[in-house]
Image: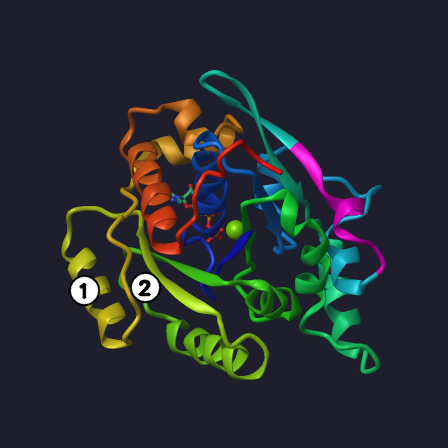
Amino acid sequence: MITIAIINLKGGVGKSVTTVNLAERLTARGLGVLVGDLDKQANTTKFFGLLDYDRNSMSEILKGTAGALDVIRPAPIKAPDGPAVVDVMPANMTLLAANREVLLDMVHPQQNRLRAALAPVAQLYDAVLLDCPPDLDMGSINALCAADWVIIPVDCDEWAADGLDVMLEQIAAVRDGFNPSLGLLGALITKYQRTNYGARVAAEIARRDVPLLNTAIRQTVKVKESIAAHKPLAQYDPKCTAAQDYDALADEVMQKTGLQVRKGGRA
Ligand SMILES: Nc1ncnc2c1ncn2[C@@H]1O[C@H](COP(=O)(O)OP(=O)(O)O)[C@@H](O)[C@H]1O
Ligand SMILES: [Mg+2]
């Protein structure tokens, strides 16, 4: 099992859209995928139709009062040859209080709770995608401590590099203190258009020695439409630019992480 944290301190850069569509594309290739939602806004959870205040959620994982199997729920997403399932650890607004509770808990270790929760399900999945909030809260820190890799979606605008330095410092700190094998898979340019910004954003990223993924996700209105329809792009409009880009991203991620479809299927 490999775990990828999808993180940027900026909101609206495509973290959740990337999580959902990369999860779907990896699932379509026959991989077992678990999505963990660490954002109290719960966009990914809502996309999959799993927002719920009566069940255990990511908040209980962070508080240490529930295990992964108490929280994980299946979300069907139709594949061309029948329904496929992405498993989800849903989030909701209780994450706000849960984050505070973890911070105030000086008795139990705070940073490795998600990593510990994922360990018992490691054999069940090939890939875990962690959708982070635009924040360096305990959820984000737990995601970075649990992850093997980080993808940083960066949108193509004038302020694309905002917060990048702080986040890179935090990634370095987590690597030094908790998770020495945490790797930067790279920055992912999202909402790409053929303007000057693409080159400028790429330069900002290169200046910080952050690898840039070869795939960029093009801007298209289909993304917003697909979210409203609660469908992954591959299902909503497989021919649109962003659907093709997320398909290419899945190949690139598999190649760069060594993620392979297991012979004989999932465990
Ligand atoms: N490739 C894209 N083309 C057009 N709009 C996009 C694209 N990616 C994301 N968006 C838009 O940006 C909004 C924010 O994306 P989202 O993934 O929710 O950001 P984050 O999780 O980083 O806050 C989405 O609602 C969507 O409308
Ligand atoms: Mg989001």
Queried whether the magenta region covers residue 70, the answer comes back as yes
- Which residue has dot 2 on it? 160
* Residue that appears at 23% across and 63% down: 201
Query: Quarter-wise, where is residue 114 in the image?
Result: bottom right
Q: Is mark 1 within 8 Å of ligand 1?
A: no
Residue 203 is at least partly visible in this image: yes
The answer to which of 80 and 181 lies nearer the viewer is: 181
Q: How many numbered discs sit on the rendered protein? A: 2
Indicate the position of residue 87 as horizontal and vertical percent values. 63, 38
Give the secondary structure at mark 2.
loop
Q: Is residue 230 left or right of residue 151?
A: right
Are the residues tagged 2 and 1 within 8 Å (C-beta)? Answer: yes
Q: Is residue 36 shown above or below 242? A: below
Queried whether the magenta region covers residue 66, the answer comes back as yes
- Which residue has dot 1 on it? 200
* Residue that appears at 27% across and 33% down: 241
Label 2 packing within 10 angstroms: few (<14), some (14-19), many (20+): many
Query: Quarter-wise, where is residue 183 in the image?
Result: bottom left
